[in-house]
Image: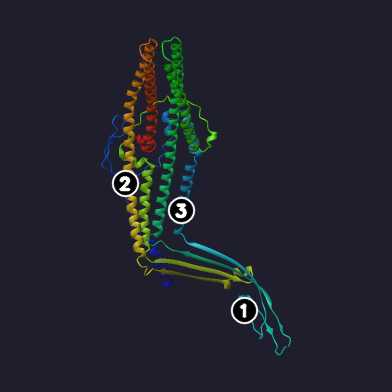
Amino acid sequence: MNKRTGLLLGVLGCVLCGCHVGPDYVRTPVAMPRHFKEAQGHAIINAKNTDWKRAHPRDHIDRGPWWKIFHDKKLNELEGRLNISNQTIAAAYANYCQAMALVDEARASYFPTLNGTISFTRQKQGGGATSFVSNSNGVTSTGTASTGGAATTQSSRITNSHTILFNASWVPDIWGLVYRQVQASEAGAQASGALLASTRLAAQASLAQFYFELRALDTDQQLLDATVRNYYKALQLTKNQYRSGVVARADVVQAQSQLETAKAQAINNGINRAIFEHAIAVLIGVAPADLNLSPRPLRAQPPPVPVGIPCELLERRPDVAQAERLMAQANAEIGVAVAAYFPTLTLTATGSFFGKGLSHWISLPALGWAYGPQLSQLIYDGGLRAATVRAAKAGYQSTLASYRQIVLTAMQNVEDDLATIRILNREAVVQNAAAADAVKALSLVINQYKSGVVPYSSVITAQTAAFTAQKTAADVTGLRMTATVGLITALGGGWEQCCTR
């Protein structure tokens, strides 16, 4: 075996036996409760859990059209338009595509690079004071000259030269620098994909909540319009009583004031409705002027939402998955920083063809080549590499803390929404009963007023109480719908796949 072959085999052995410096990533377990504290009264998908759960995100599972649980055709239509035209989602998707391209960019470092140069030169070279012959670059020139002012004669030749040059270079990934860079890029791309899913889920949830809030305002508008009609009837009754000499002029003025106040509230309700309608238009990617939602009071009741065990949040919520992937990316960056301590081996090779014409390129005398390895090592950097490694390790600890905090926040979101729904459900029963009683009380007071038993101030008090009770009951229904959307979002956007896997 000659020296050249031995060198090549040695380099090949180093490449094949290359190691990956830096720590390998291990998913961090997170302490999880066995059940949600506020889950009483909700269907539980799974009752089995352990105190510690490793992060195995399943955010890539298609959540499906979770909004269809509300059985609202208009909402289904709007959600479909949002998924196509929402510009925030479009920007997040473009960022994801960019992150995927960065993965390919990192992987390209595994392979050698090859540069090629083709040149053509046309030149003229004149004669000198003495005769000469030059074979450089294929140029031949001769010349003679005389001194003392005598005439000078010279000859020259115009020549062409053609050159093609190849340069190849490869840095084998002996210490796993490229491997860790690819790992970091892949984790970053997966984090970007999770951010896309989180952005889409947030936009879908916002649309659903805005939609139900708008429909709740339609319910309020229906109630306000009915209240205006009832107050108008009360005013006519008071006027008749006044003409009959039963009541004073003050009663008529009070009834008139009550009616005008109700009209003002009915008009003012349109402000919030317009704002929600405009917000929905922007979410689905159209100008507010291009969207008109016909008024329709909210009739639906919130559907029951089955609740899974807490550890499923680690698999369902895209923001948790994003935080876990960022942790993996930070871990890989430690390896990138550690790899800077080790030498870099560069393999280079060059080849060239030269001639006065294209036909000379294929002749062996026109062929030139060179190759050889180069090993370089940074000897002193003033502590730069050590500081870089420390910074990378601190960055990992930061992402670890952020991940754990996001998990805690996710559990808080679910507990909050579970408590909200449970309490609102109880409140709805009581408030609906209160509204029914207030309407009955108003009817009794009006009859008493007609009989002259009570003053008109009692009618005003009963009217105000009835309107307030009915509006609160309607608002509670709207709050229950939006809280249900919030719970679905907190659970990661659905639960069907959790049931079936």
Mark 2 highlights which residue?
404
For the C terminus, the image quarter is: top left
- Mark 2, secondary structure of its residue: helix
Q: Quadrant of residue 374?
A: bottom left
Residue that badge 1 annotates: 135
Horizontal and vertical percent position of residue 255? 43, 18
- Tell me where residue 17 sits by quadrant: bottom left
User: What is the C-alpha distance between the residues marked 2 and 1?
Assistant: 75 Å
Query: Where is residue 257 shown, x and y percent of the image?
Result: 44, 22
Q: Position of residue 108 (x, y in %)?
A: 46, 57
Q: Earlier in the sequence, mark 2 or mark 1?
A: 1
> Considering the numbered disc 1 on the image, is that residue within a helix, a strand or a loop?
loop
Three-letter amino acid code at the position of disc 2: Arg
Q: Amino acid at mark 1?
A: Asn
Give the left or right position of residue 48, taking residue 149 as reference. left
| Quadrant the N terminus occupies | bottom left
- x and y percent of residue 224 in the render? 44, 23
Q: Which mark is residue 9?
A: none
Q: Are marks 2 and 1 in contact (CB under 8 Å)?
A: no
Q: Residue furthest bottom?
A: 148
**Is residue 32 shown to the viewer in this render?**
yes
The residue identified by callout 3 is: 102
Q: Is residue 356 above or below residue 242?
A: below
User: For the residue carrying disc 3, how many other residues have a C-alpha within 10 Å: few (<14), some (14-19), or many (20+)?
Assistant: some
Q: Nearer the viewer, residue 214 or 33?
A: 214
How many marks on residues? Answer: 3
Mark 1 → mark 3, Cα distance in angstroms: 51 Å
In this rendered view, identify the residue nearer to me: 144 or 348. Answer: 144
Q: Nearer the viewer, mark 2 or mark 3?
A: 2
Can you say whether 339 is above or below 214 in the image?
below
Q: Residue at point 33% right, 56% down?
A: 393
